[in-house]
Image (cartoon, rainbow, N blue to C red):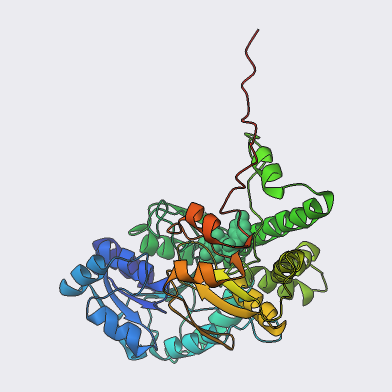
């Protein structure tokens, strides 16, 4: 009987294990730091030399990872980085945290997973454990990663002399209350021994593990989590469209519904869905189901509603200017916030980009301000953010709040903006007095 598992479990338990984290983005770097802080010696692997150099110089480029933590771990030689995959040969445990975007066709693009796994297979040795973290469709670990790793020249047998699992990332950029270490982590192995080994690997650094019966179950858990968000955001965006036609204030309706202490979870309408997860992950699931001749109707409908929101808000700008006798064409429009959500600097899939595109195409003159995004060079848009917000507010014909960063002085903006479209209800209307829920005196 191969004793790879026993030896690996001993290494992981002793803390002498050497760990590799492939992909050092908003998921991989926090994971590498948490592994190093738990006692492992960690080598981060990334193709981007800027990321590699920054880490080796003790710098963090991820808001949620402190400079100090990277500096200390690098000085203690518990964290380093390289672009050289051969470092894997010295490792006992490897985590893959690479992006899983969509192709232009809207189909899943797992090319990063494939290319990294092909590199990994060259250096995979008996006695290693591999965990895939990238969000992907159910079956990827078994149908794509496992066959590629099994091609290794070392006659590897999964569950016997090497171990493979899937554990979805749950990083919520900008969140302070739940961290990589404290957020419960789902994990599923190809075999029971794979699950046992990967739990020993992660259990040293993550407070709570949630084992499931397979890698496909773990892959599906993640997609359910993000589909749940996308569908509920789509629902409240449609409720906004309904309230618009009913002449109701959707935020008042949602705030009141949210007083229900059970059976309701508050989501808020907005400019549309941004980020590299929520707009994309559910489409991995609907794509997989289409290959099984099933149409994931909720996912496709939610995507249709969410992607229509930038056009809805651009029309609102046009109508508001029109009501004040100003054509959109030639009007100066100032967008406040271009990041995909508050208090982050990431513009990937940001609906602000679509709103800017839509208004520019109709002849408006666009400027933007975002305290986290000095330069916009994305999706064919190249703009420099204004630095003097107050001057920009006075110069604008219409101001659109797209991202409600916490640092904005909303009362000041309300006073200075000639016309204001608020896609986030960052600025409650001055007049509406929301009747506070009254506790009925007990008889
Ligand atoms: N949004 C709304 N209304 C809402 C909530 C969000 O319009 O009620 C918008 C946001 O403005 C943003 C988009 O949806 O543009 C996504 O928002 P998000 O809060 O889900 O942000 P992400 O994508 O950075 O993080 C999510 C994580 N969020 C939470 O759990 C709160 C989580 O689903 C995943 O850990 C992460 O994606 C991921 O990596 O999958």
What residue is at 67 percent from the left and 73 percent from the top? 284
Relative to 413, say whether 158 is above or below: below
- Residue 131: x and y in percent read 46, 71
Quadrant where ligand 1 appears: bottom right
The one of 426 and 9 positioned closer to us in this rendering: 426
Asked if one can make out residue 255 in the rendered structure from this viewpoint, the answer is yes
- Horizontal arrangement in the rendering, residue 30 relative to residue 386 (left or right): left
Relative to 404, say whether 133 is above or below: below
The one of 366 and 39 positioned closer to us in this rendering: 366
- Residue 290: x and y in percent read 78, 75
- Horizontal arrangement in the rendering, residue 385 relative to residue 42 (left or right): right
- Residue 266: x and y in percent read 63, 47
The one of 52 and 17 positioned closer to us in this rendering: 52
What residue is at 72 percent from the left and 74 percent from the top? 288
Q: Residue furthest front?
A: 325
Asked if one can make out residue 221 in the rendered structure from this viewpoint, the answer is no
Q: Say how many tags the image has.
A: 0
- Residue 191: x and y in percent read 53, 66
Q: Residue furthest left?
A: 75
Look at the image and tell me in which quarter the N terminus lies: bottom left
Look at the image and tell me in which quarter the C terminus lies: top right
- Horizontal arrangement in the rendering, residue 110 relative to residue 320 (left or right): left
Among the 4 quarters of the image, the one containing residue 422: bottom right
The one of 383 and 35 positioned closer to us in this rendering: 383
Among the 4 quarters of the image, the one containing residue 221: bottom right
């Amino acid at each position: 009987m191969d004793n790879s598992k026993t030896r690996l479990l001993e290494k992981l338990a002793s803390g002498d294990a050497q760990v590799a984290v492939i992909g050092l983005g908003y998921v991989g770097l926090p994971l590498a730091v948490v592994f190093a802080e738990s006692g492992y010696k960690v080598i981060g692997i990334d193709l981007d030399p800027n990321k590699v150099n920054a880490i080796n110089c003790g710098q963090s480029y991820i808001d949620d990872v402190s400079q100090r933590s990277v500096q200390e771990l690098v000085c203690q030689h518990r964290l380093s980085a390289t672009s050289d995959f051969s470092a894997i040969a010295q490792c006992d445990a490897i985590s893959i945290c690479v992006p899983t975007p969509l192709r232009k066709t809207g189909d899943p693009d797992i090319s990063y997973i494939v290319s990294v796994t092909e590199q990994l297979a060259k250096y995979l040795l008996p006695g290693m454990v591999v965990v895939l973290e990238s969000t992907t469709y159910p079956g990827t670990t078994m149908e794509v990663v496992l066959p590629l790793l099994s091609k290794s020249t070392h006659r590897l047998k999964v569950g016997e002399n090497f171990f493979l699992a899937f554990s979805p990332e749950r990083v919520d950029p900008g969140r302070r209350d739940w961290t990589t270490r404290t957020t419960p982590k789902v994990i599923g192995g190809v075999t029971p021994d794979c699950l046992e080994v990967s739990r020993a690997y992660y259990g040293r650094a993550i407070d709570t593990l949630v084992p499931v019966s397979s890698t496909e179950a773990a892959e599906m858990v993640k997609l359910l989590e993000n589909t749940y968000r996308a569908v509920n955001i789509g629902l409240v965006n449609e409720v906004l469209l309904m309230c618009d036609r009913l002449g109701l204030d959707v935020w008042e309706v949602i705030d009141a519904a949210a007083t229900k202490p059970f059976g309701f979870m508050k989501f808020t309408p907005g400019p549309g869905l941004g980020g590299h997860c929520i707009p994309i992950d559910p489409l991995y699931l609907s794509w997989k189901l289409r290959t099984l001749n099933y149409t994931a109707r909720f996912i496709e409908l939610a995507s249709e509603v969410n992607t229509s929101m930038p056009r809805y808000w651009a029309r609102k700008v046009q109508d508001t200017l029109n009501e004040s006798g100003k054509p959109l064409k030639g009007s100066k429009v100032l967008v406040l916030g271009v990041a995909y959500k508050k208090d982050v600097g990431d513009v990937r899939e940001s609906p602000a980009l679509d709103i800017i595109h839509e208004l520019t195409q109709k002849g408006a003159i666009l400027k933007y301000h975002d305290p986290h995004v000095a330069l916009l060079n994305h999706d064919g848009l190249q703009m420099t953010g204004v630095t003097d917000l107050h001057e920009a507010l006075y110069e604008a014909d219409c101001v659109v709040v797209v991202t409600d960063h916490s640092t904005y002085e909303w009362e000041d903006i309300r006073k200075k903006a000639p016309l204001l479209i608020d896609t986030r209800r960052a600025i409650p209307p001055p007049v509406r007095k929301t009747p506070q829920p009254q506790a009925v005196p007990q008889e």
